Image (cartoon, coloured by chain):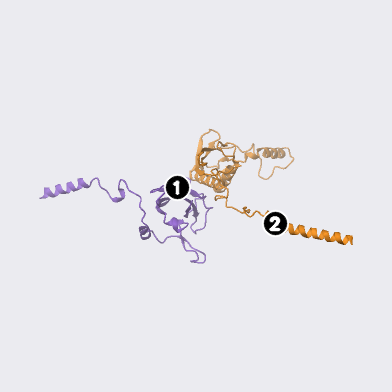
Amino acid sequence: MRATACALAGLLLAASTVADARERRPRLENRGGVPARDLDPSEKGLVTGVGIESQDIQAMTNQMARDLIASGFLGRFSTPPRVLIDEQEFRNEGSQIINRRMITQRLLVELNRAAQGKITFVGQRYAGMVARQRDLKREGVTDTGTTGLTQGQAGVDFFLGGAIMTLDSRDPRTGVVQRLNQIAFELVDAETGELAWTGMYEFQRAAAEDVIYR
Amino acid sequence: MKNALAAAVLVAVVATAGCSTPAARPQAVLECDYKALKRNAPSGGPALTAVAYGSVKDIPADAVLMSDERLFRSVIVQHLSTSTTPGGTVQVTARLANCTAGPLGVRARVAFLDSNMAPVEAVSAWRPVFLPHGGMAVYQESSLSPKATHYYIELAPN
């Protein structure tokens, strides 16, 4: 009798818990929230401010690749020049925190696709790994591979330089913030320091409510 | 009589020496005439046709495709041309006239096509174009590929 009463009480407790959970569920839903969705990186997103955003990264790298190919720079060489494109000399002097490599890496990929073998890109980021592989080959730990040995790692003819610069202003009365973003790109002769090509992408935006970039 | 005629001609020549054709007036106000656009726009030429012919109305190649009627009524393509860049690629130039009563912001991108109207490369990134009130702006973009033979520019509100 006592066991039956306990079982019944447990059943009632479980039933009420389920009922409570059902009642609570609508309250826990984030009805006013924004569900995850796929966005086109070439368009403005849901969170936008006055700084560099996805559409700007796409636009600037696309424009710089087109400008460089159109400039006739590649017509000067009978052998594809070796070019280093990474973030080392591409500096962030602006007020926005940004991963510079998002720009340089996309520019590298765009140029690599467009140049169709007319530029040899050097991956100096991997110099340590390349040195290790060279040692393994020369010590006989591995064979020499199929593409042969070279005297040294690939030297660079040109490297990418440049800077992200910003000019910020804010109206304390209205809270409107405004930012001029200037992104300069330079292709520098690694032997002489001459600028073989330059490009500039700039835009200005204003907004009453800025967002936090991180 | 001969002398009088010669003098009259001379006076007329001198009087009109400072004049020229209306197109070369020293100053002017931008005016858009959509009736003239309809009347004088070149027709025919290459176009992008739908697989099921007519299901999508032919899109003229080497032209500007406006995203909507409102934009069509706001901008007139005053000049359209192509040139070859020093790198051997194709550069398109479109000069756009602002036909609205204020400044106008649009964005543009271009798709470069081969002779069969197939894309030779990915469409370019959108770029903003700002047209001042009563003025014009130039949109220029160059291809990545030297194989581009046709193109169409897409114009949309910014």
A40 or B56, which is in the foreground? Answer: A40
* Image point (20%, 47%), residue name: B13
Give amino acid for label 2. Arg
Give the structural element (helix, strand or loop) at label 1. strand
Q: Which SS class for mark 2?
A: helix
Q: Position of residue A161 (x, y in %)?
A: 55, 37
User: What residue is shown at x 70% (from left), y 56% (from top)?
Assistant: A25
Image mark 2: chain: A
Q: Quadrant of the N terminus of chain A?
A: bottom right
Image location of residue A38, percent across then percent down: 61, 53
Q: Chain of mark 1?
A: B
Amino acid type for the residue under numbered disc 1: Phe
Tell me the orange chain. A
Depth order, front residue of A134/B57: B57
Residue highlighted by disc 1: B130
Nearest the eye: A186 or A191: A186
Note whether A214 is above or below A16 in the view shown.
Answer: above
Q: How many numbered tags mark residues here?
A: 2
Which residue is at a point 43% across and 57% down the rendered structure image? B72
Image coords of residue A49 (percent x, y): 55, 45
Chain whose colour in the figure is purple: B
User: Which disc number belongs to residue A25?
Assistant: 2
**Of the residues tagged 2 and 1, which is closer to the observer?**
2
Q: Is residue B102 visible?
A: yes
- For the C terminus of chain A, the image quarter is top right
Q: Does the CB distance between marks 2 and 1 fall below 8 Å?
A: no
Residue at the extreme left:
B1
Q: Is residue A121 above or below residue A25?
A: above
Q: Is residue A31 left or right of residue B117?
A: right
Q: Is residue B52 above or below residue B95?
A: below
